[in-house]
Image (tube, rainbow, N blue to C red):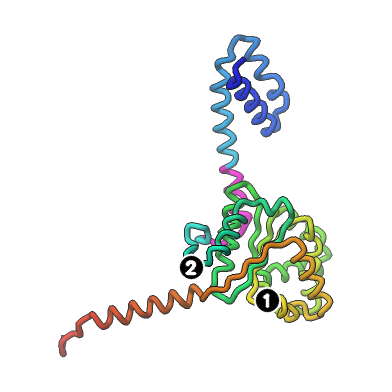
Amino acid sequence: MTRGATAKRERIVELLSHFKLPTLAAELPKRFDKEGQSDALLLVLELLEMEAGDRQQRRVERLKRASKLPPGKSFDELHDKRLPRPLWQKITELSSGAFLERATNVLAFGLPGTGKSHCACAIGNALIDKGHSVLFTPTYALVQDLLLAKRELRLPKLLRQLDAFELLILDDIGYVQQSAEEVEVLFTLMAERYERASMFITSNLVFSEWDRIFKNPMTTAAAIDRLVHHSVILEFDVPSFRTEDAKSRGAKSKKGGADTPRPEAGA
């Protein structure tokens, strides 16, 4: 048997095992050989590859629906030329998904409008295309869900549901002005995922200002310690994209107005 034929048989067994068809994986190649139909295995492999592709596409579609990622936030719409090269390199490396295997957190800091959330979503979409599960949520909304779950005595159940996502994107943690109860459930979430699953957190506040979020200095220090222990930090030290776009549109509008002749009186 040639090396190519052996590779095809191994791939057939691999796909059938992946489809949870162990009996077919064990018997199909042998039965085809026994019946003198070894050449037909090429067609079988072609059909199995088609099935694998269709299953992957359906899985990606399910993951995208479950992710709650906002539309139009992919790498295609990201203005990479506005970002410093070292930052862009980190972002593209994260899109490979290797950090998920180590339960590494990603912490993105910067002023509003600098592209933190867009980058988080772009990475999330790239990971989904690779088959990873992602959930995007504004931090304030998740905190309210956790608080309600706690009051209804189903917080452990909700935390287990969140465990199903390999990456949890908490957007705009700096906007959360929390009560003691809200701080408690947010800290519980961070503690539960510590060294088990990744989080991607965007914030307008640097660590030295996180006492605004967690109120208590000890809780603030404990939260930062868990997040930073295994982490990649992205610093968006760039001008606001939205402000730059607004200025650009304003300049074009003024230029267009200057070039446009005024209508004659009575026109």
Which of the 4 image quarters holds residue 169?
Answer: bottom right
Q: Residue at x 68, y 76 (%)?
A: 206
Q: Is residue 66 magenta?
A: yes
Q: Amino acid at mark 2?
A: Arg
Residue 171 appearing in the image:
no
Tag 1 or tag 2, which sits nearer the N-term? Answer: 2
- Circle 1: is it few (<14), some (14-19), or many (20+) Cα within 10 Å? few
Closer to the camera in the image, 51 or 79: 79
Circle on res. 82: 2
* Spot occupied by residue 104 in the image (x, y as percentages of width and height): 72, 58
* Spot occupied by residue 96 in the image (x, y as percentages of width and height): 61, 51
Circle on res. 206: 1
* Spot occupied by residue 146 in the image (x, y as percentages of width and height): 76, 67
Q: Residue at x 63, y 28 (%)?
A: 11
Label the magenta part by its dominant secondary structure.
Answer: helix
State the quadrant of the N terminus: top right
Q: Compute the Cα span from label 2 to label 1.
A: 22 Å
Closer to the camera in the image, 202 or 233: 233
Q: In the image, is residue 243 above or below residue 38?
A: below
Left or right of 151 on screen, residue 107: left
State the quadrant of the C terminus: bottom left
Q: Residue at x 52, y 58 (%)?
A: 74
Q: In the image, is residue 70 above or below residue 224?
A: above
Q: Is residue 224 magenta?
A: no
Left or right of 63 on screen, residue 243: left
Of all residues shown, which one is farthest toward the bottom? 265
Which of the 4 image quarters holds residue 203?
Answer: bottom right
Q: Which residues are magenta?
A: 57-71
- Circle 2: is it few (<14), some (14-19), or many (20+) Cα within 10 Å? few
Circle on res. 260: none
Q: Amino acid at mark 1?
A: Val
